[in-house]
Amino acid sequence: AQSVTQLDSHVSVSEGTPVLLRCNYSSSYSPSLFWYVQHPNKGLQLLLKYTSAATLVKGINGFEAEFKKSETSFHLTKPSAHMSDAAEYFCVVSGRGTGGGNKLTFGTGTQLKVEL
Amino acid sequence: DTGVSQNPRHKITKRGQNVTFRCDPISEHNRLYWYRQTLGQGPEFLTYFQNEAQLEKSRLLSDRFSAERPKGSFSTLEIQRTEQGDSAMYLCASSLDPGVYNEQFFGPGTRLTVL
């Protein structure tokens, strides 16, 4: 079984300052990890995914995440926050279900607030 | 490619009534997933189809829930005898490649409120 823990339910930053959203995972095998973003009244959008090709993963809108096996972490970062980054962010682990499909297990989410 | 669509976007019903939601995946996506998201939580897996075959159901999917994908295209999720605890956002996602790294594309969801 796999799971993810998002360490902060709310994060508040000032526009132009760095963003750090923390995620730890638990998996009995090499995990597939994702970050999704959910803006109000919009569907979940994939930010980035870890495919084991590189530990530092770059995503859309300037976000990136680093896979650290020794720390079982997959933290999401951005050098400079923008007002449009305000949203809910989910750390997600993918595992093979009993039917062969890819079940996504979501964390509880981190609400990012960006202030002027 | 118009993305995953879901209808209705909002549904308000009285306890005990039946409701049905529809999901239209991205065309040619052979895999379709249903998730449920309650307030303040991340989405939770409900069930999954490959083409028209329902291959897995979560224990969250009680006997009052049924999902179909009759022609391997759109899918419906029906809840019978709704309860207040069914109030949630119901999300649909689709994907094409069976690889574990492949992205699931999500629809905007159907928000259900049971009074």
Image: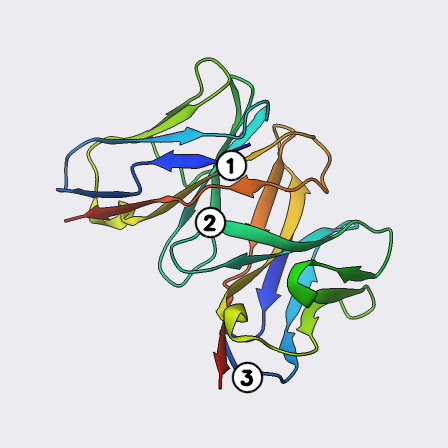
Disc 2 secondary structure class: loop
Asked which colour scheme the image uses, the reply is rainbow
Q: Nearer the viewer, mark 2 or mark 1?
A: 1
Disc 3 secondary structure class: strand
Residue A43 tag number = 2
In the image: residue A39, left or right of residue B65: right
| Residue under numbered circle 1 | B3
One can see residue A16 in this view: yes
Amino acid beneath label 1: Gly
| Residue under numbered circle 3 | A13
x, y percent for residue B6 = 38, 36
Q: Is the residue A88 above or below the residue B70 in the image?
A: below
Dot 1 crowding, Cα within 10 Å, few <14, some 14–19, many 20+: some
| C-alpha separation, residue under disc 2 versus residue under disc 3 | 24 Å
In this rendered view, identify the residue nearer to me: A37 or B46. A37
Q: Are marks 2 and 1 in contact (CB under 8 Å)?
A: yes
x, y percent for residue B52 = 51, 17
Residue at 69% from the left image edge and 66% from the top image edge? A62
* Disc nearer the start of the sequence (2/3): 3
Which of the chains bears the disc numbered 3? A
Disc 1 secondary structure class: loop
Which of the chains bears the disc numbered 1? B
Which of the chains bears the disc numbered 2? A
Q: Is the residue B74 above or below the residue B47 in the image?
A: above
x, y percent for residue B53 = 53, 18
Marks 2 & 1 on one chain:
no
Residue at 14% from the left image edge and 36% from the top image edge? B16
Dot 3 crowding, Cα within 10 Å, few <14, some 14–19, many 20+: some
Amino acid beneath label 2: Gly
